Image (tube, grey):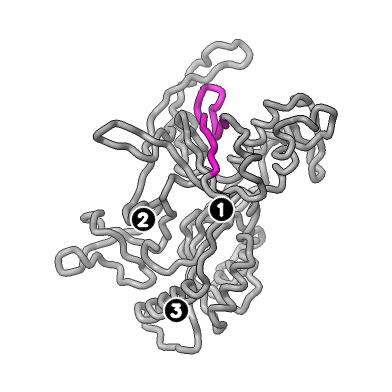
């Protein structure tokens, strides 16, 4: 079902900390952050919640873990069903209302951003609207809305860290937060909205509507991240397969024409990641040069695709990521490091298969990599441009 989150206060969802005293929120909300907020809501309303209770999950000891205890008061609890289903529901990434992820193949005019985008896969890398059609362009990332690059409204909040032993201000501990404060700003009325949309599968609308107020992200104890959750649609729209095949054929023809390919026996198609992806490239023992073909094979293996396709091109931002699992018992709460492929990354494939077989296979996938139930690894077909 499609879900809308209406924020009552600004929020901070942490990305990579660039310096120790500055934290800037990312402009989207991963599914695991939503799941953590739901877990905290359940625990705060659980009659049997014990903050010192330790449970073992997959061989790891955890605290503040949500599981159905099946005790006398559980049968009448309004959160009974949500508690039982929390570990099985699927939650997508949430993005500002009506926005989409910019594919990494898009380029924008350096002289005038109002000239729009060109797609490197099916167009020449120059701005056709500049004089002589030779304007310089550069790659762009993030989100777009109504065909234009989109930025959320952010505001600075300065805080002082507290010494947990004395309860007073910690010396030299001023830090700044750059929180998301709005996704829509009307200059005439001053009215601002902070609305995000995504999908939650595995719950009924009435099982989610019992939540009066949720707190999402960091620093919720000081008022950030307050929001209401609304179900705006029970069914997820499925695209018309015939229209998808036609779009893939058009992309194939445009890609071949732009890249001077005359081989009618092969077909080209592209996918765009609409969320971040956690992949295992298996680079631990690599200490020598890899050829382009070897690198393409590594990508295909990491994606786990079991189909007669080849990786043709990759437009991706990849970085090493190691998050924290605050539910773990012990001093070391770090998670295992992973390779994170950023949302918007585009992969072009080459195949001899018919497009209907390609669609059958890719539609059967839940996503790529790890944590697909939390929205990671989700993708869509990329047909070129701002589609």
Q: Which numbered mark, 3 or 2, is in the foreground of this view?
A: 3
Which image quarter: residue 253?
bottom left
State whether residue 127 is above or below residue 188.
below
The residue segment tinted magenta is: 213-231
Residue 131 in view in this figure: yes
Residue at position x 24%, y 62% in the image: 136
Is tag 2's residue or tag 1's residue first in the polypeptide sequence? Answer: 2
Residue found farthest to the left:
131
Tell me the residue that label 1 is attached to. Answer: 340
Residue at position x 58%, y 67% in the image: 299
Q: Residue 249, which numbered label? A: 3
Is tag 3's residue or tag 1's residue first in the polypeptide sequence? Answer: 3
C-alpha gap between disc 3 and disc 1: 31 Å
C-alpha gap between disc 2 and disc 1: 19 Å
Circle 3 sits in a helix, a strand or a loop, which is it?
Answer: helix
Front-lying residue, 246 or 157: 246
Residue 347 in view in this figure: no
Circle 1 sits in a helix, a strand or a loop, which is it?
Answer: strand
Tell me the residue that label 2 is attached to. Answer: 140
Front-lying residue, 234 or 248: 234
Residue 366 on image: x %, y %: 63, 60
Is tag 3's residue or tag 2's residue first in the polypeptide sequence? Answer: 2
Circle 2 sits in a helix, a strand or a loop, which is it?
Answer: loop
Residue at position x 33%, y 61% in the image: 107
């Amino acid at each position: 079902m499609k879900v809308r989150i209406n924020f009552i206060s600004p929020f901070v969802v942490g990305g990579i900390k660039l310096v120790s005293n500055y934290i800037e929120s990312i402009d989207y909300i991963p599914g695991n952050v939503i799941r953590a907020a739901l877990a905290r809501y359940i625990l705060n309303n659980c009659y049997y919640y014990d903050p010192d209770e330790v449970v073992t999950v997959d061989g790891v000891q955890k605290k503040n873990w949500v599981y159905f205890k099946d005790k006398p008061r559980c049968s009448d609890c309004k959160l009974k069903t949500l508690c039982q289903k929390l570990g099985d529901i699927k939650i997508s990434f949430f993005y500002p209302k009506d926005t989409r992820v910019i594919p990494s193949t898009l380029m924008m005019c350096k002289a005038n951003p109002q000239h729009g985008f060109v797609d490197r896969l099916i167009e020449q890398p120059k701005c056709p609207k500049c004089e002589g059609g030779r304007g310089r362009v550069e790659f762009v990332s993030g989100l777009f809305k109504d065909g234009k690059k989109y930025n959320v409204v952010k505001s600075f909040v300065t805080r002082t860290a507290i010494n947990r032993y004395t309860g007073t201000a910690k010396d030299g501990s001023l830090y700044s937060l750059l929180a998301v404060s709005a996704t829509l700003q009307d200059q005439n009325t001053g009215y601002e909205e902070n609305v995000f949309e995504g999908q939650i599968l595995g719950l009924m609308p009435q099982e989610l509507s019992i939540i009066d107020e949720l707190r999402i992200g960091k620093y919720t104890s000081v008022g950030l991240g307050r929001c209401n959750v609304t179900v705006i649609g029970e069914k997820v729209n499925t695209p018309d397969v015939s229209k998808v095949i036609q779009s893939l054929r058009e992309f194939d023809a445009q890609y071949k024409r732009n890249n001077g390919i005359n081989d009618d026996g092969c077909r080209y198609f592209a996918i765009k990641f609409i969320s971040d992806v956690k992949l295992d490239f298996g680079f631990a023992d690599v200490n020598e040069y890899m050829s382009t073909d070897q690198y393409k094979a590594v990508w295909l293996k990491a994606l786990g695709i079991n189909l007669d396709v080849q990786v043709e091109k990759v437009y991706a931002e990849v970085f090493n990521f190691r998050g924290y699992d605050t539910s773990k018992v012990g001093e070391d709460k770090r998670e295992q490091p992973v390779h994170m492929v950023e949302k918007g990354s585009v992969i072009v494939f080459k195949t001899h298969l018919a497009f209907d077989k390609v669609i059958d296979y890719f539609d059967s996938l839940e996503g790529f990599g790890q944590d697909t139930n939390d929205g990671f690894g989700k993708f869509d077909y990329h047909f070129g441009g701002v589609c």
